Image (tube, rainbow, N blue to C red):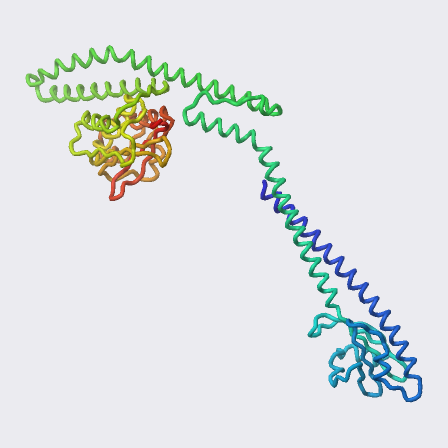
Amino acid sequence: MSAAFAVGAFVLSAGVTVVSYELSRNTLFRERERTAVRATYFDATVVNAGLRGADPEVGDLLRSVDVGADRYALLYRDGQWYSRSAEPAASAAVPRGSQDMAAAGQAGAQRIVRGEGPALVVAVPLADGAVFYEIVSLAELENTLQALALVLTAVAIMVAAGGAAVGWYVTRHALRPLAAVADAAQEIGAGDMQARLDPRTEPDLVRLTTSFNHMADELDRRMQRDRRFAADVSHELRSPLQTLAASVSVIHRRRDGLDERTAAAVDMIAAEVARFQVLVNDLLELARSDQPAQRETIEIAALAERAARSCAVVGCIVEIVPGTPPSWYVDPRRVEQLLCNLVENAIRYGGGPVAIRGGRLGNSDDCYLEVDDAGPGVPEEFRSSIFDRFVRGPAAHSRGDGDGTGLGLAIVAQHASAHGGQVTIGARPGGGARFRVELEGCLR
């Protein structure tokens, strides 16, 4: 909108400038021509009177005419050209059209361009076939018009700048409520379900703010119901699931006494029960992920090594970037679990973890954790959705693994959000994927 105001103001001011310049130019030229014609007729009357005398001296007669510095007088008489100064090429200063018109007995004026700039030739026929000419310089008028053009151009630019400033102010004032709505929606999208609009800031938009706040309240209540439902269902499933797992464990220990088909069925049931237990635990973790992070000061290197050992990883390098404080202020349970999930994801689908790295984000109090793997990487089209719930990447589908729940990376994203951060995925130099978790306020 600011650009539209600027363009509109510029077009309007440019139009006014062009019209004003043309009107001024035409007016000044007409006035200058009228003045020049009157002066030429007056001088021609003086010269004509002098020519009526006996044996007039034409040179002295022309020098007696007061033409000033901006006019040049010529006389054509009896096939000869006369001027105030003896110029052999005086006839070249008068265009052929003016000469023919004067020879026909008609007075007139014609604009020409000389070496000194634009000029006006005025021709006045005299007695006995003589013609008096005055060449009037228009250089001063041309300079005046150039100055006027510069002034009008500067005014047009200032008007366009003023239009842009007005457009910026009007746009900012008009879109400020929408910017507040967008900021609140972005905060809600980032996980802050308490973000609301203040109706007092924009009294004219009370209906909009009230509707937005009502929508946010309804969304918050629905999400809380969904979390409670998931937590209740997961909790209720744990008891019968534990009983089922114990029963399957008893049968599995006696699989050697079973026939081949029955033993295979028992192995399948045991694997699915174990996967079901992981799924229930992940659902419970997601259900309580909206609780605030319980931060405390821990040694981040020791926590990362513990996460790697819990996944039975051998040879994974834990590296803390030099210059990064060793103690971080985080929720140790959440950070350890998100590292475990990333390491397990690298084991299942990425050819194993290569490195776990931690460092500071610039000069701020924020930090990051990275887990590199040796797999094929994640294509661009999957990177934005791979952290959604029950979404599995292309590597899982290509391998046909069925032991993943599709919730591991979603839990990582929830734990990062609980720390005011985010998780992203990129390409590791040399091949593979790099998962990067950014956490706010870790070094305060």
Compared across the picture, whether 46 is left or right of 143 comes to right
Compared across the picture, whether 310 is left or right of 78 comes to left
Residue at 16 percent across and 15 percent down: it is 248
Give the camera-side residue of 218 and 420: 420
Residue 9 is situated, as x and y percent measured from the top left of the image, at 65, 46
Give the camera-side residue of 74 and 246: 74
Q: Is residue 202 above or below residue 128?
A: above
Give the camera-side residue of 274 and 209: 209
Residue 67 is situated, as x and y percent measured from the top left of the image, at 82, 74
Residue 220 is situated, as x and y percent measured from the top left of the image, at 44, 19
Q: Quadrant of the N terminus?
A: top right
Outermost bottom residue: 55
| Quadrant of the image occupied by residue 290 | top left
Q: Is residue 143 above or below residue 439?
A: below
Q: Quadrant of the C terminus?
A: top left
Residue 342 is situated, as x and y percent measured from the top left of the image, at 26, 30
